[in-house]
Image (cartoon, coloured by chain):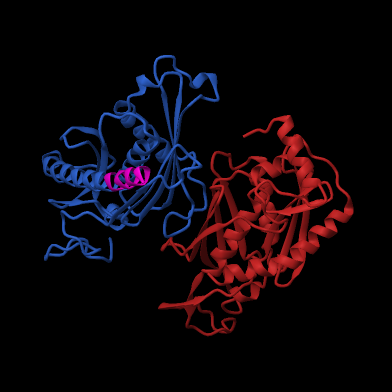
Chain colours: A blue, B red
């Protein structure tokens, strides 16, 4: 097992957080204004991702055109250098990455108003520069921010967060050390509601403990939503100020 | 954005005229502004991100591994990933092989700086990610690799240098890092239009260029590889061999300034 004390009797985790504390959250939007229609750069703990949204645009292939709604395509590029130990193989066609892409596409299919962009393609491209646990949650936040930047109509924010279960204690936002030694779930929460648009359970987790896990997860996701919202509002205020001058 | 025939003809005439007027008013050797960020990936030994003013962007990570240098001779390994292109596409493969050739251990770079003991060396894995590029990215990639290698710190060895007698693995200091001091080669790309050569060609200039020259600079001299490359797939023509000489002269004259600019970061 691990050399580290995952959760000390005093209630501290390996990185010094308590059970209900989030990691450092730093986001910015419109970082690649020329390369894409919407973009975001997100640092959540040691996760660092760049998200580019290209579209709604005319699809290059006929097969990607739906006369009733837009098609959402998510591609996740996990770089070889993203973990501490460099991986020899590219992650492009890995099963886990393909599954993550499918899960993200399904989540945002329900949240983006695709019917108002018929015959178009919305291409979401994510580059993971560094990862340290709870990656899917970070990806959700990155996509939400980039879609908002692109001005694509959505019903609400989706904020993602991961929660681990250590013995009987739920731990909010696991890092990679914690992720390796305990089972964890990832939530995608719709706005300020308690509705889940994604529940990703990749490990076994006792059903009677799930309620406390979900409770802290939803609270954490609401906090993440607030952090994203305040950054977006700050940004919007700046733009308004610039345009009136 | 594709140019019309009239636009192309206008651009070509102004670029190939005696004065060589560029659409943005730059001098033939003048670069557009670059934004450089280094050391932003704590899990890599060195990292760099360059954003050009046309929003071309390249990210490079340098990670080190300890290898037996009798078994593995190549101590630099470059891998290129261009967003939206397959790993086995011809552009990615050409770029990868060119950059590996530039950083060859037997070539112009001083690989002895990576030697740890008589048996072991550091091997550097240089991963390139091109997020977007509007003209040929080789120069941008090379600059990013240059600044990433110049911001690379490697763990300090505390065991002895001579380990052939006593079979031991190198041990490292827990906290101390040593700055890597190699002077990596730089790759310049020049656009040839008529009798003129231009550094750092923008997308519209590349579109009308007769040809492109790839010229490598290391330390204080021009080194291999020197190549030509097609910058567009509609207007590629041959060029006067004297133009090559002119291009080499231009790199010789101004490459030092580029190196100094990066060294002052």
Is A104 positioned to the left or the right of B15 in the image? left
Per the image, is A238 magenta?
yes
Which residue is drawn at the image coordinates 59% and 81% (left, top)?
B164
- Residue A219, position in %: x, y? 15, 45
The quadrant of the rendering that contains the N terminus of chain B is: top right
Which residue is drawn at the image coordinates 46% and 45% (left, top)?
A32
The correct choice, above or below, for A10 with respect to A170 in the image is below
Residue nearest the observer in this picture, B90 or B73: B90
In this rendering, does residue B107 appear at all? no
The correct choice, above or below, for B167 with respect to A193 in the image is below
Is B3 positioned to the left or the right of B156 in the image? right
- Residue A181, position in %: x, y? 26, 54
Secondary structure of the magenta portion, mostly?
A: helix
In this rendering, does residue B251 appear at all? yes
Which residue is drawn at the image coordinates 41% and 22% (left, top)?
A70
Per the image, is A6 magenta?
no
Q: Residue furthest top?
A: A67
Residue nearest the observer in this picture, B201 or B223: B201
The correct choice, above or below, for B95 with respect to A68 in the image is below
Q: How many marks?
A: 0
- Residue B219, position in %: x, y? 70, 72
Q: Residue furthest right?
A: B241
Q: Residue furthest front?
A: A245
- Residue A94, position in %: x, y? 46, 40
Magenta highlight range: A233-245
Which residue is drawn at the image coordinates 65% and 64% (left, top)?
B74
């Amino acid at each position: 097992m691990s050399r580290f004390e995952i959760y000390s009797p005093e209630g501290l985790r390996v990185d010094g957080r308590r059970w209900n504390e989030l990691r450092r959250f730093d986001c910015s939007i419109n970082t690649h204004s020329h390369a894409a229609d919407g973009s975001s750069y997100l640092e959540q703990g040691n996760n660092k991702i760049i998200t580019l949204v290209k579209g709604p645009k005319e699809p290059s292939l006929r097969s990607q055109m739906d006369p009733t709604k837009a098609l959402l395509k998510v591609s996740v590029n996990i770089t070889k250098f993203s973990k501490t130990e460099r991986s020899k193989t590219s992650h492009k066609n890995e099963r886990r990455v393909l599954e993550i892409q499918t899960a993200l596409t399904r989540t945002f299919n329900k949240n983006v108003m695709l019917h108002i962009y018929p015959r178009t393609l919305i291409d979401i491209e994510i580059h993971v520069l560094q990862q340290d646990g709870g990656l899917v949650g970070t990806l959700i936040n990155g996509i939400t921010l980039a879609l908002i930047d692109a001005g694509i109509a959505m019903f609400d924010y989706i904020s993602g967060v991961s929660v681990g279960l250590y013995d009987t204690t739920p731990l909010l936002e696991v890092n990679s050390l914690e992720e390796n030694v305990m089972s964890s779930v990832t939530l995608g929460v719709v706005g300020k509601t308690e509705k889940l648009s994604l529940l990703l359970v990749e490990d076994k987790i006792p059903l009677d403990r799930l309620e406390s896990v979900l409770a802290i997860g939803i609270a954490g996701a609401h906090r993440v939503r607030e952090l994203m919202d305040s950054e977006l509002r700050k940004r919007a205020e700046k733009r308004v100020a610039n345009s009136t001058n | 954005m594709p140019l019309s025939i009239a636009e192309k003809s206008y651009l070509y005439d102004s670029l190939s005229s005696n004065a060589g007027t560029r659409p943005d008013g730059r001098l033939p050797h003048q670069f557009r502004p670059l934004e450089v960020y280094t050391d932003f990936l704590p899990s890599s030994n060195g990292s760099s991100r360059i954003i050009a003013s046309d929003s071309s962007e390249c990210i490079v990570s340098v990670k080190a591994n300890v290898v037996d240098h009798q078994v593995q001779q190549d101590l630099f390994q470059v891998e290129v990933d261009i967003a939206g292109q397959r790993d086995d596409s011809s552009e990615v493969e050409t770029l990868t092989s060119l950059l590996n050739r530039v950083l060859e251990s037997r070539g112009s770079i001083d690989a002895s700086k990576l030697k740890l003991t008589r048996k072991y060396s550091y091997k550097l894995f240089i991963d390139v990610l091109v997020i977007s590029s509007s003209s040929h990215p080789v120069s941008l990639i090379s600059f990013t690799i240059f600044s990433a290698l110049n911001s690379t710190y490697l763990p300090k060895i505390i065991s002895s240098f001579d380990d052939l007698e006593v079979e031991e693995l190198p041990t490292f200091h827990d906290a101390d890092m040593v700055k890597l001091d190699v002077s990596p080669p730089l790759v310049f790309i020049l656009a040839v239009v008529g009798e003129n050569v231009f550094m750092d060609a923008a997308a519209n200039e590349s579109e009308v260029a007769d040809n492109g020259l790839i010229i490598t600079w290391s330390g204080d001299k021009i080194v291999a590889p020197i190549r030509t490359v097609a910058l567009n797939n509609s207007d590629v023509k041959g060029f006067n061999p004297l133009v090559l000489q002119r291009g080499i002269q231009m790199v010789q004259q101004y490459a030092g300034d580029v190196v100094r600019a990066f060294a002052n970061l």
